[in-house]
Image (spheres, grey):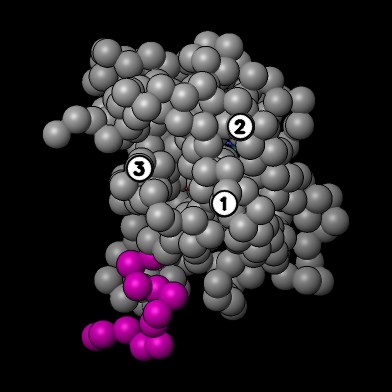
Amino acid sequence: MSPRLLNKVAIITGAGSGIGLESAILFASEGANIVLADINQAAAEKAQALIKSKSPNVQTVFVKSDVGKEEDVKALVERAVTEFGRLDIMFNNAGIMHPQDDNATNTEEKIWDLTMQINLKGVWWGSKYAILAMRKNPTDPARGLHTGGSIINTASFVALMGAATPQLAYTASKGAVLAMTRELAMVHAREGIRFNSLCPGPLKTPLLMDFLDTPEKRERRLVHLPMGRFGEAVELARAALFLASDESSYITGSDFKVDGGLSSCYVTAV
Ligand code: NAD
């Protein structure tokens, strides 16, 4: 069986940690050339070295970028096209969960704005510049290369369900990513550009585990998880790989849930 992303070019934002890191490793192992984007240079360079050791035949490029800045996102996509001549996969994955994000009365406007800047505008800009690049992709049917591509935007289970442990700006930003992605999918379907939202459940990554820093905080969530455990970043990477590959060629506009059943749950088994 040939590698699932052979000859494709992928940008992954937030590639230095968690879902982005596991996806970069997995996409590379399936033959994609990867542009790793992160605000954290040390983490992304470590990721790049790891990929080089595991998948020496693919090429990787690191671009330091803050997805909360439009000029950074534009430069990121331009670098991918300059380096590899095309862009097939855009994984708009970087996001933050701010420790001071709270309920409606406690959340400060600056925390709200920062969260929206990164989690929502970052995904909009990533989508915008990826569309412009994917329209120009050179075709090469013999190598399975076409115009268009796959854009995956990371939302969250909190875009679908409410939590009594609030992070209001985060939740609002992810709900907006979900709605925006559906509409993008409709607008660009006939150009061969697929858009899907990835909706992770609670995961054992730094983003959540730094926040749930006591056994009590973790237990408050674990009791609601049907499988009785947090998800692993690699379990999301496997779903992202499917959405990135041509195996999902008839899937667009989906709210792709990888949440261990959480969003279908009323009471958990004991
Ligand atoms: P993580 O904290 O492990 O990794 C996030 C990466 O994004 C880090 O390397 C960080 O440096 C980078 N980053 C942060 N701000 C950035 C910016 N402005 N520009 C570029 N890079 C930036 O997080 P994760 O758990 O892998 O989360 C990835 C995505 O999944 C996020 O969008 C997050 O909201 C979403 N998500 C996570 C969970 C969870 O439980 N971990 C659940 C649902 C959704």
The x and y percentages for residue 227 are 27, 71
Residue 90, position as x, y percentages in the image = 52, 36
Q: Which mark is residue 246?
A: 3
Say whether residue 95 is left or right of residue 29. right
Whether residue 234 is situated above or below residue 8 in the rendered picture? below
Mark 1 vs mark 3, foreground winner is 1
- Residue position for label 1: 189
Looking at the rendered image, the quarter that the N terminus falls into is: top left
> Can you give x and y, in whole percent of width and height, for residue 252 in the image?
49, 56
Q: Which residue does the numbered mark 2 point to in the structure image?
A: 135
Q: Secondary structure at mark 2?
A: loop
State the predominant SS element of the stretch in magenta.
loop
Residue in front for this viewpoint, 62 or 100: 62
Above or below for 235 versus 219? above
Mark 1 belongs to which amino acid? Ala
Picture residue at 38% right of the left edge, 14% below the top: 59
Choose the circle earlier in sequence order: 1 or 3.
1
Of pointers 2 and 1, the one earlier in the residue sequence: 2
Residue at 23% of width from left, 30% of height from top? Answer: 3
Magenta region: 259-270
Q: Residues within 10 Å of mark 2 (few under 14, many from 20)?
A: some
Whether residue 38 is visible, yes or no, is no
Which residue is rendered at x = 33% and y = 23% of the image? 143
Tag 2: residue type?
Arg
Q: Residues within 10 Å of mark 3 (few under 14, many from 20)?
A: some
Q: SS of the residue at dot 3?
A: helix
Q: Tell me the distance, in whole angstroms, between the alpha carbons under discs 2 and 3.
A: 17 Å
Q: Is residue 267 magenta?
A: yes
Q: Are marks 2 and 1 in contact (CB under 8 Å)?
A: no
